[in-house]
Image (tube, rainbow, N blue to C red):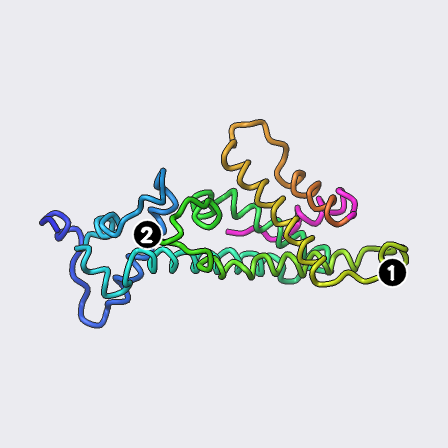
């Protein structure tokens, strides 16, 4: 470490090692969100960002993969919390679904770097194995359950012949997966091509949810515009 780097960061007092860990995590998260090619991230870059020697990282993370996976878990927890908070107080299953999906879409558009960290791909499997994204299962699970509830709550749902046999868990999971795929595509395309003359984001979301729930677009638009926005 150069004298300039040393001057930039003083050694943490005894017992404050967690402060350095937090700085390392913050630096790694910032680099993953802003690097043109986040898959090229190295421990040396993280150390330089914080102003410590690379060896200092090993007291908190055994390797780069552990650090990156820690960042992923934090980001998944953050997005899941945003969706839960948005749905707090929702009056009815459809309002719950709209609030969760609106929170997801707006968080992804308002935080494109963080969204890319979670869903952008490109990270080597040896660095971020597939099971490292297991923390994201809560996101999909909440969408699956919320969509199933909104469909069951649809007026006249149980009286329609095609719905006499109740949908099973597998069908509900597939329906939720298709909806999440649509939401992800909307965020990814919006972020990648933001200079296009996109329609209003809430209107696009409402039309997407109308296709998956069979509910009127106007009803969903009204719910989306009154839903809690993530901060």
Residue 21 vs 217, above or below: the answer is below
The span picked out in magenta is: 214-231
Counting labels gives: 2
Residue 147 sits in quarter? bottom right
| Nearer-N-terminus badge (1/2) | 2
Residue at screen point 76% across, 46% down: 219
Looking at the picture, how far across and down is residue 16, in whole percent? 24, 68
Closer to us: 208 or 174: 174
**Which of these two is toward me, 21 or 202?**
21
Q: In the figure, residue 40 lies in which quadrant? A: top left
Q: Position of residue 97 (x, y in %)?
A: 67, 55
Residue 130: horizontal and vertical position, in percent?
46, 56
Q: Between label 1 and label 2, give the one nearer the viewer.
A: 1
Q: Which mark is residue 28?
A: 2
Which residue is the site of mark 1?
A: 164
| Secondary element type, mark 1 | loop
In whole angstroms, how far apart are the C-alphas of marks 1 and 2? 52 Å
């Amino acid at each position: 470490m150069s004298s300039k780097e040393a001057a930039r960061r003083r050694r943490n007092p005894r017992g404050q090692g967690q402060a350095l860990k937090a700085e390392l995590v913050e630096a790694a998260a910032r680099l993953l969100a802003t690097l043109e090619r986040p898959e090229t991230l190295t421990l040396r870059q993280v150390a330089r960002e914080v102003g410590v020697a690379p060896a200092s990282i090993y007291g908190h993370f055994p390797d780069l993969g552990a650090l990156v996976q820690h960042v992923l878990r934090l980001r998944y927890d953050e997005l899941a919390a945003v969706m839960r908070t948005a749905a707090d107080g929702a009056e009815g299953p459809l309002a719950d679904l709209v609030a969760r999906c609106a929170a997801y879409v707006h968080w992804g558009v308002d935080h494109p770097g963080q969204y890319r960290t979670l869903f952008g791909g490109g990270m080597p499997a040896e660095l971020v194995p597939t099971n490292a994204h297991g923390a994201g299962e809560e996101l999909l699970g909440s969408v699956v359950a919320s969509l199933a509830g909104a469909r069951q709550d649809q007026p006249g749902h149980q009286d329609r012949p095609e719905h006499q046999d109740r949908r099973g868990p597998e069908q509900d999971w597939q329906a939720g997966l298709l909806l999440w795929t649509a939401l992800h595509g909307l965020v990814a395309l919006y972020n990648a091509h933001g200079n296009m003359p996109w329609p209003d984001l809430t209107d696009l979301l409402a039309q997407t949810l109308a296709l998956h729930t069979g509910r009127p677009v106007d009803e969903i638009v009204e719910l989306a515009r009154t839903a809690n926005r993530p901060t």
